[in-house]
Amino acid sequence: MKELIDGLAEEFSSQSHGSSDYWKETQFIRGENDTKFLPLNYALKKSDQIKNIAELQSSGYVISSLDFLGLESFSDWFQNVFNRKLYQKDKKSILIIHHPDQKKIFEAIEIVDQVFKILQDHKVLINGKNIPVQMGEWYAKTILGLRQIKSSSQRGFDFYDDENKKVEVKIHWQNKTSPKGVKLKRSLVELSDYTVIIYVAKNFRIREILFLDSPFVIRKFAGKGHTLFLKDPDVQSYFFSKSNKHYDKIKNRSSLMKFATADLAVKIDEKTEK
């Protein structure tokens, strides 16, 4: 089935269909790669082997919204094939039928299982929290020397520095920050002396660190609600890559340099002594 679909996607994508009504479709099948697609109805008309979506699903195809997949290449493909722009409002209604390579996914799961066991053995992963959060918290303990102690007032753990000052630690796992910023609970910031955000890249390396006095965060960024947002443009001057104000908080520089992204490591190396 996949070879058939890939062939039809190649065929459809190699021609202009600006005079057709296929641009009105909301369900498209991904071909061999992110530059080849075809409308579902085109596939149904061209092949007797494909009768409905259920047959595609039984062959391993899955359905996801275009927004969920974040396929930027689809807009370019759409414009090239239909000679018209795909507007943001129209993207929301589009579904992509795609075929994950289950063999590679199974192999990856086996690798993840092995990695998970190693991280458990070395006490990086200790509970049911997601892996990026636990990795970021481990970075906070390893690099900043924070102590993670069972909370006496709520479920979970609190962080303290070597002067027994409370630190609110937030982990942000993305290659870039949303324009809305990093979301913090106002009450937790108010109960802490410092606020730390560990920005973890998708490859699990540290792409940035933000260390601020919590009273400053409340004074400068808190609004009327229960949450506050730290947007990159508003706080970037305090990033470790920009400012060395809190470099005295670094307890293990070698670990920071080892686990930082190359870009962050270079910038910190320029500001600290070897």
Image (tube, helix red, strand yellow):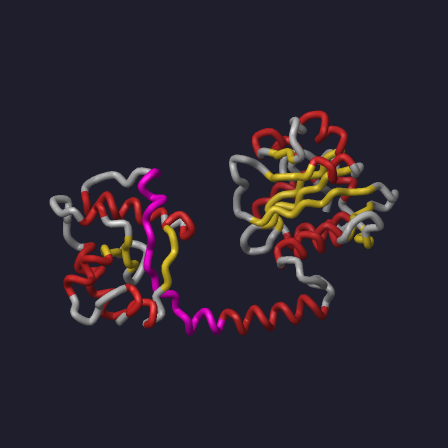
Magenta stretch bounds: 88-107
Q: Quadrant of residue 52?
A: bottom left
Check the picture and name the quadrant holding the N terminus.
Answer: bottom left
Query: Residue drawn 86% across and 46% down?
Result: 162
* Above or below 13: residue 210: above
Query: Residue drawn 60% across and 49% down?
Result: 200
**Along the viewing direction, whichever of 6 and 268 lies nearer the viewer:** 6
Q: How many marks?
A: 0
**Along the viewing direction, whichever of 32 and 207 lies nearer the viewer:** 32
Q: Is residue 66 visible?
A: yes
Instruction: Please provide percent x and percent y for residue 197.
Output: 67, 42
Query: Residue drawn 22% across and 60% down?
Result: 9
Q: Is residue 91 covered in magenta?
A: yes
* Above or below 52: residue 228: above
Instruction: Please provide percent x and percent y for residue 226.
Output: 67, 34
Q: Quadrant of residue 32?
A: bottom left
Q: Is residue 70 covered in magenta?
A: no
